[in-house]
Amino acid sequence: MSELESRLHSTPAQASGLQLGMVAAERSGDMLAALLLQGLRKAWPDLKASGIGGPQMDAAGFTSLWSCDELSVRGLVEALWRYRHINGIRQQLLQGLLARLPDLYVGVDASDFNLPVERLLREKGVPTVQLVCPSIWAWRPERVQKIRDSVDHVLCIYPFEPALLEQHGIAGTFVGHPVADVIALEPDRQAARQALGLPSQGTVVALLPGSRPSEVKGLALPFLQAARLMLAQRPDLQFALPTHGLLKPVIEQALAQAGMQGRVHLIMGRSHEVQAACDVALVASGTATLETALNKRPMVIAYRMQWLSWQIANRKRLLPWIGLPNILCNEGLIPEFLQEQVQAEALAKAVLRWLDDPVAVQAIQRRFTDLHHQLRQDMPTLSTHAIQKVLAR
């Protein structure tokens, strides 16, 4: 028996309280799952939860059999390259779950990993819930049948999703976006700067090149090259870049290549504080764009992936934008630079344009405030109520 299998079979046996299986496959899912766990523990104080997670879930009492970082991939081609490793983890996870069926399974985003697990468990009578609706409204609408076969209920973080799911016979509840509960309606820029040790005066540009190693490898260098161009025009600019231990070596290599060593405040974690502290952000497409919007900061969105992955994904794309603020506002409010458009000079110009247009900044802040109110719904509590109804059935 492998070491991982040994860990699986050493998971605590069924005891009092809800026995929960859960998988989050990346750092953003780790945050969502940790908040959900906090809500569930109010209803089930003796909750036992295990599966695949990250540090925030572990801090909430979760037992991670594998780290979510082992599943974190970007793009279809990279997923194929790592398929054997990821599928091996899924098979071992399933072996343990089927040997000791949980009372409930919650898949957190990562539908390509979670839906097959949910389908098999559902066939065994285990209630299954998916937190974060697979984005059938943005791309890959063919997944509707898989969702219907796999999931008893979907906890939706965007308000238009339950009606869309209902059209396909899938039950869903809008629970709000948990980040909207965590981030203050009026973020305190000065308090955030003080907490991070950043200058209280002057202009701060946040650099957020992603949370996955593959993202950071593709975006850190052009982001830092753009920062160098901005610095040449405005020597008083300050730059802040949040990261974590897994990504720090990649960031440090990019800093050296861009000639920006010592010119960027590297901050371990604390991305929300960095977003609150900044005046404008350069952000990789993903959850960080929504977090930046909820912090009411203007931004420039960029994304670049492996060429073949992009060709496949782009053909299935149903919307003209990829950035969540643009999608949720249904308008191209934020400039997006994709693939070959990710060039340092273009990124620098777009960031500086925000700094030169305070009227546009005020307008975008008003739109982001409206969005914040719409998404702030107390996700942990609403999710717990929806799960209680699923279990009652």
Image (tube, rainbow, N blue to C red):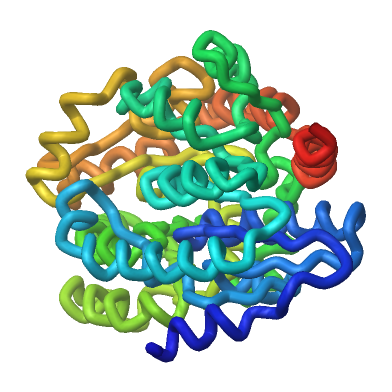
**Picture layout, residue 8 above or below residue 273:** below
Above-or-below relation of 248 to 381: below
The structure residue drawn at horizontal position 21% and vertical position 38%, both measured from the top left corner, is 338
Residue at horizontal 70 percent and vertical 26 percent from the top: 173
Residue 368, given in percent of the width and then of the height, sits at 61, 29
Looking at the picture, how far across and down is residue 261, in whole percent? 30, 81
Instruction: Give the residue at x 31% y 27%.
Output: 140
* Position in image of residue 175 (x %, y %): 72, 33
- Tell me if I can see residue 385 in this picture: yes
Nearest the eye: 276 or 353: 276
The residue depicted at 53 percent of the width and 9 percent of the height is 167
Indicate left or right for 355 with 191 as reference: left
Q: Residue furthest top?
A: 167
52 with respect to 250 (left or right): right
Q: Is residue 35 left or right of residue 109?
A: right
Query: x, y (%) of residue 53?
Result: 55, 67
* Number of numbered callouts drawn: 0
Q: Is residue 280 visible?
A: no
Quarter of the view holding residue 69: bottom left
In the rendered image, the quadrant that contains the N terminus is bottom left
Image quarter of the C terminus: top right
Q: In front here: 152 or 26?
A: 152
